[in-house]
Image (cartoon, rainbow, N blue to C red):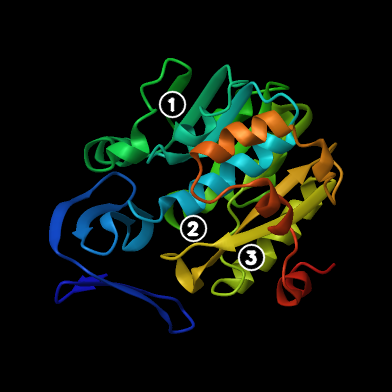
């Protein structure tokens, strides 16, 4: 929510973040959610959905580089990619840094998010018009039912498990994703903040372990998300965990590192070494 020129998001536990607003840029309600954009001197343009933080120009790279480069550089030759959500375009932008990519389907339920991102976040959405990208405005729950044995990497760049993102956090959906991927595929959903949203985090990993043979969280800072600490799930039926980091192609990784503000091979290994409290949350 925002009041007195101050945007603030408070978790159910009673803590959160506050950002001073310089100017409101956009506010409307789509068929699915309330979409707002404001400018902040500290973070540039900021996108919120239903009052919850989604993207800021200043720190978006923390999220987008982590959700993309860890699974992409673990896979030996990722060609066909599915992005579920991700209407701001940052995930697609990072994916197209990988020369192996032949095609990306981006399935976003809310066209307003795409349109607003193109207008107010050009540095984030800059790759959405690339010919390798097919944008599908549809509920991903329905889209995925028609796909079989096609994708090498699936990135679930969803909102929180409420509102339009709620259907992306259940067993039927993940089973459909599993059917849509090839042998050796990697599926990476965003899995919330293990500190600020510990119960959602715990429930998500219990669910992922029911569907996929190999599941592990990896974590990294995310300055403007609740708790400042975020997680993604590394899921596969074929890729063993812990990962063999010596198999990461050095040439491919160096290419990505040259364009990255966050990602490097040392970090790739480190993000899987999670704190004890995170291990406790995912313990069987």
- The tag earlier along the polypeptide, 1 or 3, is 1
Q: Residue 114 at x, y = what percent? A: 32, 36
Q: CA distance from mark 2 to mark 1?
A: 20 Å
Residue 208 lies, with reference to residue 249, above or below; the image says: below
Residue under circle 1? 136
Identity of the residue furthest to the bottom in this view: 14
Residue 4's disc is none
Residue 196 lies, with reference to residue 82, above or below; the image says: below
Q: CA distance from mark 1 to mark 3?
A: 28 Å
- Is residue 90 toward the left or the right of residue 21 in the image? right
Residue under circle 2? 160
Residue at the image point whose x is 78% and y is 46% from the top: 211
Q: Nearer the viewer, residue 184 or 76?
A: 76
**Residues marked 2 and 1 touching at CB (< 8 Å):** no
Residue 142 seen in render: no
Residue at the image point whose x is 48% and y is 30% from the top: 106
Residue at the image point whose x is 71% and y is 71% from the top: 278
Q: Residue 5 at x, y = what percent? A: 15, 72
State the SS at label 3.
Answer: helix
- The tag earlier along the polypeptide, 3 or 2, is 2
Residue under circle 3? 201
State the SS at label 2.
Answer: loop
State the SS at label 1.
Answer: strand
Residue 230 seen in render: yes
């Amino acid at each position: 929510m925002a009041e007195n020129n101050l945007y603030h998001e408070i978790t159910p536990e009673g803590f959160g973040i506050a950002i001073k607003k310089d100017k409101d840029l956009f506010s409307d309600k789509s068929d699915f959610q309330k979409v707002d954009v404001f400018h902040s001197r500290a973070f540039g343009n900021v996108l919120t959905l239903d009052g919850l933080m989604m993207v800021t120009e200043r720190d978006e790279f923390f999220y987008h580089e982590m959700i993309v480069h860890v699974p992409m550089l673990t896979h030996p030759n990722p060609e066909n990619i599915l992005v579920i959500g991700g209407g701001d375009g940052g995930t697609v932008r990072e994916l197209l840094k990988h020369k192996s990519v032949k095609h990306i389907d981006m399935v976003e339920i809310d066209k307003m998010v795409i349109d607003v991102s193109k207008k107010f976040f050009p540095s984030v959405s800059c790759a959405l018009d690339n010919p390798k990208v097919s944008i599908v405005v549809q509920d991903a729950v329905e889209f995925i039912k028609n796909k079989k044995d096609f994708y090498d990497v699936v990135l679930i760049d969803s909102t929180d498990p409420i509102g339009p993102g709620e259907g992306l956090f259940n067993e039927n959906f993940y089973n459909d994703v599993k059917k849509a991927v090839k042998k050796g595929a990697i599926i990476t959903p965003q899995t919330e903040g293990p500190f600020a949203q510990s119960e959602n985090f715990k429930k998500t990993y219990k669910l992922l372990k029911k569907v996929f043979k190999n599941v592990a969280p990896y974590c990294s800072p995310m300055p403007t998300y609740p708790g400042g600490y975020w997680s993604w799930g590394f899921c596969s039926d074929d890729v063993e965990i812990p990962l063999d980091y010596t198999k990461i192609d050095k040439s491919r990784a160096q290419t990505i590192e040259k364009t990255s503000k966050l990602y490097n091979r040392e970090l790739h290994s480190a993000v899987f070494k999670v704190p004890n409290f995170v291990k406790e949350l995912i313990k069987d």
